[in-house]
Amino acid sequence: MHHAVSPKADANSKESDVLLWFNIVWRGFPIMKKITLSGYYGFDNAGDEAVLYAIINSLRKLRADIQITVLSNNPAHTAQLYNVNAVNRWKIAEVYRAIRKSDLLISGGGSLLQDVTSKNSILYYLGVIGIAKFLKKPVFIYSQGIGPVNYKRNRLLVGKMLNKVHAITVRDPQSRQDLIDMGVKKEITVSVDPVLAIEPEDVEISHGRELLASANVNNIDGKILGISLRPWATDENNFQAIAQACDTLAQQGWQIIFIPMHFPSDVQIAEKIQSLMRNPSHVLKENYTPYQTLCLYKTVDLVMGMRLHSLIMAAVLEKPMIAISYDPKVDRFMELINRPEILPIDNLKTQQILDLVQNTWENRDGFVKHLKKTIPPLRTQALIPARMVVEILGQDFLKRN
């Protein structure tokens, strides 16, 4: 499937090809461009891994001669999975060496610049940017979701560091406003989450069915509800409401399958819900790759997601979905696809969940039709940061010659 791209974006791509050929003619061989990628990678989080998978695919589609090094919590696994170089994100000498050898540092995507999960994790990502600036390397902020950033120290540091980077792209308008509020004066381009660049045709339903069969899920001919929950500090009654709703849905003929996005914590919360149910359900217990997770979502009929990227994957695969929101980023995404009806995690009622499932299912054809119209322009938008990266690398080549 081909999607229209803007004339400017198309020109950028052609310019990149011209530079590559000029390289070959002038020097007799292409200069390999080197990028270091910093993010929450190698932590068995399928959402962040899907972001990495999508960024790598987008860059390689536009420029095949890019050599990518990922800062990872599990370098060997990351290198093997994505066919990239990878170094230990915690070993400062390795990080320093990787950035020194690179032409560009990419920071992102995902929600790196926030201090809700930890007051100090934000310092790590800003520190990596600081190393690149010390080495006089350009830094590109790639479709990040910003915030919430609550601590004054962190807000000041974000403003100070991001005013020094080469270019900034964020995944939603609110993130842009958050950066402006923190004193960022540089131009900020609004894009979308990188995972929205994935083409549904590239995801095989047969592979998803094989994965279900290997997990002993055999009855896949009926209605399947795929659920992705995450642990969250909330009143137990909210998870109890989910369990009761799932129980009723199973009684109504739904096959309930819990799909983990962060291993193993999502398996544990799913098993807890399952233990509260009387009717059968399946908890998938493997540490799936981003591609495997996409294939699993392709097998289901309806998605109920608390994890942001379970909802983004559902949208990419044109599946009707129900969002349980624990964070503003979930609300922002549902607003982006013009489906703002969400269930807040802190105020769940069993009947409310059942009503929304029934309503979404009864209107599924309209929901899918809406996604088929809404997602293709977002897919084009998701490639904007990759095109900008290729353009920066091209400018870098001209400067050096």
Image: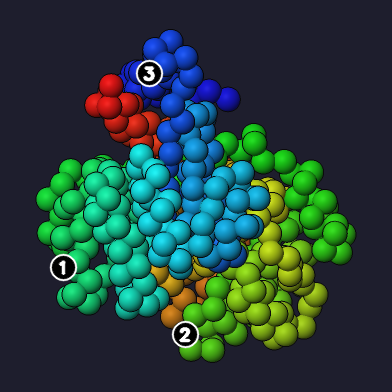
Observer-side mark, 2 or 3, equals 3
- 299, above or below 268, in the image: above
Task: Give amino acid for label 2.
Answer: Ala
The colour mode here is: rainbow
Horizontal placement of 115 versus 302: left or right? left
Going from N to C along the chain, the mark reached first, 2 or 1, is: 1
| Neighbourhood count class around disc 3 (C-alpha, 10 Å): few under 14, some 14–19, many 20 upward | some
From the viewer's perspective, tell me whether residue 330 is left or right of residue 397.
right
Disc 2 crowd, CA 10 A, few/some/many (<14, 14-19, 20+): few
Could you say which disc has been placed on residue 19 in the image?
Answer: 3
Q: Which residue is mark 1?
A: 156
**Residue at coordinates 17% horizontally, 75% vertically from top-left?**
152
Front tag of 1 and 3: 3
User: Which amino acid type is marked by label 3?
Assistant: Leu
Q: Residue at x 40, y 36 (%)?
A: 386
Residue 233 is marked as 2
